[in-house]
Image (spheres, coloured by chain):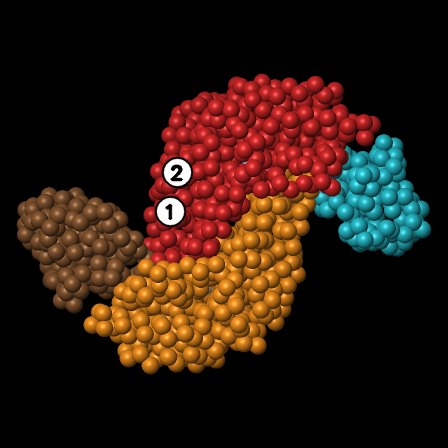
Chain colours: A cyan, B red, C orange, D brown
């Protein structure tokens, strides 16, 4: 069933047992993103040490796709160098826009390749991207302003 | 008279197709947009094939025929809601109709009864569609007027206890939906119109979810403006309606050809309504298509459409509530209630539920339904909505219920 | 490549009908609205028959397909004029597109480069269609900005001698037609754009009469905004286009669903362009129909359409001028000239001439063609206009000339 | 030919030899009307004596239908009592909106019955009505304000 392609085991697992959910008390930057078409919201805390990501924590409401995706992202990107994390993020965005033509490199994306099926459901791509966009926004802010607290942004 | 749904469905070509690998289409999203009978598609096509020309502009036969077809559609719309033809303005959508009113009010000269100042107030409700909320926020911010609103109670009804303080003496505009596109609630117009009259406020009625579903007579409603969209009433996309019996007092909104009386390089004067509000070559084929849609509805009878939907709504409400953890968001009784049925199902996110239903061929809408403040007020991130029309039937409810139960298992 | 007009005409169902007691239809009114090929009518119909659903809103298959069709149409429009998809806004008409720009400028916060004050100036020309004149008169009156204009010389060209004083240092907006819908004049954009750049003014191009008739690449034009109507380019009624590569700096115009980022009862924030400018359920079927129209034009090739019209225009100009007392109003040469051909015939009032032509099956337009200040400037009460398109042919010119001569006898 | 039905001999005669064309130097009320869809314009002077119409003169540009129609009206209404002129005007308006179903009473409308054919050409009805509407406007102003000079109005 096509649906199983979307809702891979890994996704439902992350949804039911999300990683890094619950906001850390301290952070270098905090962003808040919403998905205007469905109302999903996410707050994401990012802490870095030099150019290395020290922690990503998050909280929010959303569908299984958006929750699982941010859970995967938070797990995958932590401890990475920010440049590397950006490259991974780009690969993930590219996968989401592939309309089902790509599978994703498991070496790079690890659990996130389970999201490949989402790219065939245009209405869900934004769900899958919500957490990643929040991360990218947070990382951009850190790069731009050194470390600054309590940025609030929103995007799609 | 009960509807012959099987026969009706044959008039709608889309029900001949299947979705998601051969599944029968269960279309429960008419609150977003309705499906179209072949007669409407044909009417639009035949306008292009036989009569296409710019209305009101040419002295040739095609232009005459196009004008007849377009003005004929205006008469049909007028008849459908108990109005006069010259009280009907064609817009592109209900959204444009409401923006037209709000901008025209901004264009009204100081002292006009439509001109708002910082001494005035605009009243809306917490259950408004964004289309009947944001234009008023903007008018308030342009004019300095204050914005107030009726709250929504947990049962999905407006809190009218405070009606005399919400619609205060300084209220100039009351903009309210006839039927909520989320809750299905039909609002108590009589009380609101009566109070608006007391303070001399104009009432703008968003009838997007009522005109397609029940008999409407503007003379009985007592409102000043009424808007709806063609595409939710079996009509084409790209056509909306604005009704008012006070159009001649309202300044124009869009400026251009055909809405003028005289034009020089420096300034212009305006044609009488409704032309004053229809700048440019209008959406002629879409008006004609809407006329055909209303003919179709008239042939069936709006009383019958209404009865059918009421029976269906009763069945849906009853059956849905049998599903464990399913909670209806909106009135549970049929009194003053239409056929938009929103609900939540335990912890399943509506987006996931909608996706599962889609995999079974069932089209519903999920999210905030363009009424985000309402969703927030109700304390849910989003809801799933089944919205019904004349082509729906009880068996579709049974399939919906079964699919929801399956989804519960899938996401368990 | 010369067009195979006979074959092309077979694609347009309207040419199968006759007018005025069995007369062949000679349609010379494409400047008002073009006829539609069956492929366009089918595309609109098939949208309803197969994919109809509200775009961007549902998670079900029909909504996905409708969104693909609608966004696909946006890409087609973008490709047609050398633009990016996100630079294209769908409106209901060119008239709405221009009003959108003018109102959005009013909505721009103080200090924004789009916000006008009484220190600023808006420049138009004497040959503008009311749609590209009155919205600017109104913006001027709302903002206090001054309105100036290029004059039209007796030969139907703009008087550019005074370009540096007309487009003065305080000019913020230059709104100009690409091709006059009365004179056929194609305006010298390069000089005007260059001068506008010097003073930092934005250029709004009314391309209603150019996009349907010649290859257009917005990147080469150097303008800031471009608008046109679908119905003049073989597309459906009820669809217009606004192009700009600066949409993200422009505040919204119509407010409602789908154009928002976040909404509370008090206020709202906006989605990025183009969604920001497309409030409500859009004119989906019409966008799809326009996409099919542009596909049709691409298949023929806009270079070929242009060549064909140029040859026809040459023939019409030559043959018409052989008629005694007939005077062409507009350029007599083909240089920077399109296929709108206006004229007067002695003392015969255009309304009478048009009526006579109609009795012979010939559809032209008579009057001020929504450019009343121009008609006044030219010192004529009205003109008769023949406007051509890809389906017209030389034999129709011969019939027109013969009918004019007959009319002279009739009214002698 | 249907066209001859529209362009009756009488109409073309009035067009070529219009009556009462050229504005009188003196008048009780002057009105200016335009037809916004085609740009036709007419100025009409009305003089009354008590309730009786003393003179109607006019000038303007327009098609044969509008010119002939005002010529006919100016000739028909002069010397009539204003009430009677109003009744004739109503009959004429009614004829114009008859879509070809009425012929008009020649006892009342005289030459104006030649206009009956216009009612089958919707785009021309306003042409035929231009002069009559100008008369009616002028008469209304006289009734409202006694006699006053130099009213300028416009309508369709
Ligand atoms: C030059 C020009 N500008 C603007 C318009 C207005 O277009 P629309 O009536 O389709 O909005 C037209 C056509 O009527 C036109 O020819
Ligand atoms: C209650 C209500 N008001 C307004 C609208 C806006 O209608 P449209 O999008 O057709 O302009 C809708 C539908 O989306 C609606 O349901």
Output the chain of dot 1.
B
Task: From the viewer's side, name the closer residue of C197 and C328.
Answer: C328
Mark 1 — residue? B71
Tell me the quarter of the picture where residue C345 sits: bottom left
Residue C378 seen:
yes
Task: From the viewer's side, name the closer residue of C302 and C113.
Answer: C302
Q: Are marks 2 and 1 on the same chain?
A: yes
Residue B185 at x, y percent in the picture: 56, 25
Badge 2: how crowded within 10 Å, few (<14), some, or many (20+)?
A: many
Residue C53 at x, y percent in the picture: 61, 42
The kind of secondary structure element at disc 1 is helix
Residue at the (11%, 50%) spot, across then down: D106
> In this picture, is B374 found above or below A44?
above
Residue A80 in the figure: left or right of residue B10: right
Q: Give the Cα distance between marks 2 and 1.
A: 11 Å
Ligand 1 within 8 Å of the CB at mark 1: no
């Amino acid at each position: 069933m096509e649906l199983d392609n979307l809702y891979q085991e890994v996704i439902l697992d992350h949804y039911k047992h999300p990683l890094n959910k619950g906001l850390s008390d301290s952070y270098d930057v905090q962003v808040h993103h919403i998905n205007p078409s469905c109302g999903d919201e996410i707050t994401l805390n990012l802490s870095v040490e030099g150019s290395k990501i020290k922690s990503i924590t998050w909280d929010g409401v959303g569908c299984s796709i958006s929750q699982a995706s941010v859970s995967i992202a938070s797990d995958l990107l932590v401890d990475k160098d920010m440049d590397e994390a950006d490259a991974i993020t780009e690969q993930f965005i590219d996968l989401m826009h592939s309309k089902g033509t790509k599978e994703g490199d498991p070496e790079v994306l690890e659990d996130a390749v389970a999201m490949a099926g989402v790219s065939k459901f245009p209405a869900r791509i934004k769900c899958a991207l919500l957490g990643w966009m929040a991360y990218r926004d947070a990382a951009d802010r850190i790069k731009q302003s050194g470390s600054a607290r309590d940025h609030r942004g929103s995007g799609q | 008279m009960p509807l012959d749904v099987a026969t009706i469905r044959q008039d709608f070509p889309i029900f001949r197709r299947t979705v998601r690998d051969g599944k029968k289409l269960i279309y429960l999203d008419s609150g977003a947009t309705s499906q179209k009978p072949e007669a409407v598609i044909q009417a639009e096509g035949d306008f292009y094939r036989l009569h296409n020309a710019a209305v009101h502009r040419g002295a040739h036969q095609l232009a005459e025929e196009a004008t007849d077809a377009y003005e004929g559609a205006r008469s049909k719309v007028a008849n459908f809601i108990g109005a006069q033809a010259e009280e009907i303005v064609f817009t592109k959508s209900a959204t444009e109709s409401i923006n037209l009113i709000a901008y025209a009010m901004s264009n009204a000269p100081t002292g006009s009864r439509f001109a708002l100042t910082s001494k005035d107030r605009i009243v809306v409700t917490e259950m408004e569609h964004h289309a009947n909320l944001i234009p008023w926020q903007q008018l308030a911010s342009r004019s300095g007027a204050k914005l107030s609103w009726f709250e929504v109670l947990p049962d999905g009804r407006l809190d009218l206890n405070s009606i005399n303080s919400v619609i205060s003496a300084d209220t100039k505009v009351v903009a309210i939906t006839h039927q909520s596109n989320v809750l299905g609630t039909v609002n108590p117009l009589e009380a609101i119109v009566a109070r608006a009259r007391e303070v001399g406020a104009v009432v703008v009625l968003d009838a997007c979810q009522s005109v397609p579903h029940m008999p409407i007579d503007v003379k009985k409603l007592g409102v000043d403006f009424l808007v709806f969209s063609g595409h939710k009433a079996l009509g084409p996309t790209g056509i909306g309606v604005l009704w008012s019996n006070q159009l001649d007092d309202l300044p124009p909104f869009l400026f251009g050809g055909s809405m003028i009386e005289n034009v020089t390089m420096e300034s212009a004067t305006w044609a009488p309504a409704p032309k004053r509000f229809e700048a440019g070559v209008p959406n002629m084929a879409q008006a004609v298509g809407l006329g055909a849609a209303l003919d179709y509805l008239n042939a069936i009878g709006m009383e019958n459409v209404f009865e059918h939907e009421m029976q269906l709504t009763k069945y849906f409400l009853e059956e849905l509530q049998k599903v464990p953890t399913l909670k209806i968001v909106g009135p549970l009784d049929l009194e003053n209630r239409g056929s938009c049925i929103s609900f939540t199902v335990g912890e399943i996110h509506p987006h996931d539920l909608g996706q599962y239903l889609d995999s079974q061929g069932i089209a519903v809408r999920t999210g905030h339904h363009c009424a985000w403040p309402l969703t927030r007020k109700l304390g849910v991130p989003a809801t799933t909505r089944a919205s019904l029309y004349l082509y729906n039937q009880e068996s579709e409810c049974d399939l919906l219920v079964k699919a929801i139960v399956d989804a519960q298992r899938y996401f368990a």
